[in-house]
Amino acid sequence: MSKHDFDIVVIGGGAAGLTASGICATLGARTALIEKHRLGGDCTWTGCVPSKSLLHIAKQIANARKARSLGVDFTASVDFEAVMKSVRATRQRVYQDADSPEVMQKRGVEVITGQAGFLEPHTVQVTEKNVAQKITFRSAIITAGGSSLNIPIRGLQEAGFLTNESIFEIEKQPEHLVILGSGPIGVEMAQAFALLGTRVTVIALDEQILIRDEPKCTQLVQARLVEQGIQFHLGETIHSANKTSGEYELEVGPLAGADKKIKCDAILVAVGRKPNLEGLCLENAGIKCDKAGIPVNRQCRTNLRHIFAAGDITTFLKFTHVAENMAKAAAVNAVLRMPFFKHEEKVIPWVTYTDPESAHVGKTGAELATQNAKFDTIEFPYSKIDRAVTEHEEEGLVIVHSTRSGKILGAHAAGIHAGELIGEFALAMKNGLKLPQISDSIHAYPTMLLGARRTADQYYIRLHKRWMSNLIRFFYRYRGKIPTSVGTREVL
């Protein structure tokens, strides 16, 4: 009989915590999931679910406008209050279906509400409304997540601003929204609000939006955003903010100094995230951490053998799908008490859900060039993917960097359903499949995934040389006329 209250304690009920606790309970461990606020975490309440729901609604307006050129005319009007109610209803449904305490308890997880702080390596204290209880455990998994990063801008704290944690709670539609940051959150919210009728300005120090993506892909995205009326001030920042009578006045310009003023009625700060370390009292257990988070190894183990961490609380990438993968590793290793499972650290797909989407997995061309890697690049346009043509979504491209043998080093796409398309390349990279194997696999016609196969077809086309055809023609006494050249971007 164990002397501890629980076999496993999971601290934090976001995507990583829900996954980890569910796996631990399924494997037979008595498991407690401690959450200080509400289960679901950032993904359900302030991240993936509400943002994609809002984007979906906004895209219906773009689709209605596009339909006019196809002979169908819709009249699109926006009831902003109803839109936000729909977004909140969607996240509530996700919570009730998958994240609620009742769901977790059915899975064998005991849910405890309160702030958990370590007292010693095998004990936490959970405090709720000034009532504290001590809980002991054999192993713990820290999945406390992250939150929006604040930027020290003169006057901004006093003026007030929105983050992803508050923007989905607003009732009144902003007339002019300024967004600080050009990463995924910034550009997704820029497009959503612009399509809903808000004037949007994006300000970012980076010279390119979505700096981790291939430039040709981000150029497609930015061009569409500009068409939709979004203004960009790249290579610039907000130097100061002042609010009077409900209106913000921002001093904006390059780092050297402000050279313009911009007025708006709402500011969204979307410049990164920080780990939720406060209140955990990690030092009491001797758990190492820094301002970037808790370092873990491939097994998601901290510096203590029985303490694991997963998701945004760690120093690794801040994505829901990464958090779930890490949580799987942490849970299995914690329960089996041996290094059984490693989290993925190389083949990780990224998707920004604008229209067009931008997605990638693996290295960019710039990263490969910096590493002095030898690689070939294939570019294939959406205009050669029949499904994209039939849906009038021809604006897009697929880019693949590979070795001479066809090993995929990086794959990138911009266009409709780019996130789904990139998944096939991620699967191939994870399992050591090369471009010829994708090309040789039958893909249903017409699908967007056929774009992956046709991109891979270009590998064979590049191998082909005119002398090969001449040799075959001579040997078999064929009489056909050989094309002067067969270029890439061909459909064979």
Image (spheres, helix red, strand yellow):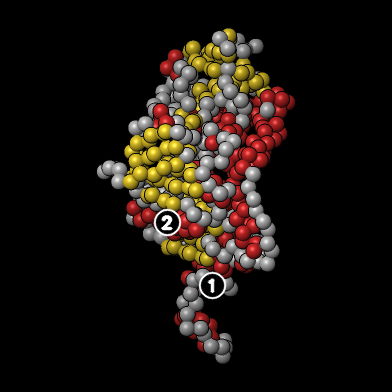
Left or right of 337 on screen, residue 262: left
Q: Amino acid at mark 2?
A: Pro
Q: Residues within 10 Å of mark 2 (few under 14, many from 20)?
A: some
Q: Quadrant of the C terminus?
A: bottom right
In the rendered image, is residue 427 in sight? no
Which residue shows up at 56% across the image and 49% down it?
197
Mark 2 — residue?
Answer: 215
Left or right of 328 on screen, residue 282: left
**C-alpha gap between disc 2 and disc 1:** 23 Å
**Depicted 231 relative to depicted 477: above or below:** above
Which residue shows up at 41% across the image and 28% down it?
158
Disc 2, disc 1: CB below 8 Å?
Answer: no
Query: In the structure shown, which secondary structural element does the residue marked by tag 2 occupy?
Result: helix
Left or right of 439 on screen, residue 268: left
In the rendered image, is residue 417 in sight? yes
The residue nearer to you, when weighing 145 against 180, is 180
Mark 1 — residue?
Answer: 490
Q: Position of residue 143 (x, y in %)?
A: 53, 27
Query: In the structure shown, which secondary structural element does the residue marked by tag 1 occupy?
Result: loop
**Residue 172 picture quarter:** top right
Q: Quadrant of the N terminus?
A: top right
The residue nearer to you, when weighing 411 against 80, is 80
Q: Position of residue 270 (x, y in %)?
A: 46, 39
**Depicted 301 relative to depicted 474: above or below:** above
Q: Residues within 10 Å of mark 1 (few under 14, many from 20)?
A: some
Q: Position of residue 113 (x, y in %)?
A: 61, 18
Q: Amino acid at mark 1?
A: Glu
Counting the numbered discs, the total is: 2
Which residue shows up at 42% across the image and 56% down it?
215
The residue nearer to you, when weighing 95 against 238, is 238
**Residue 16 picture quarter:** top right
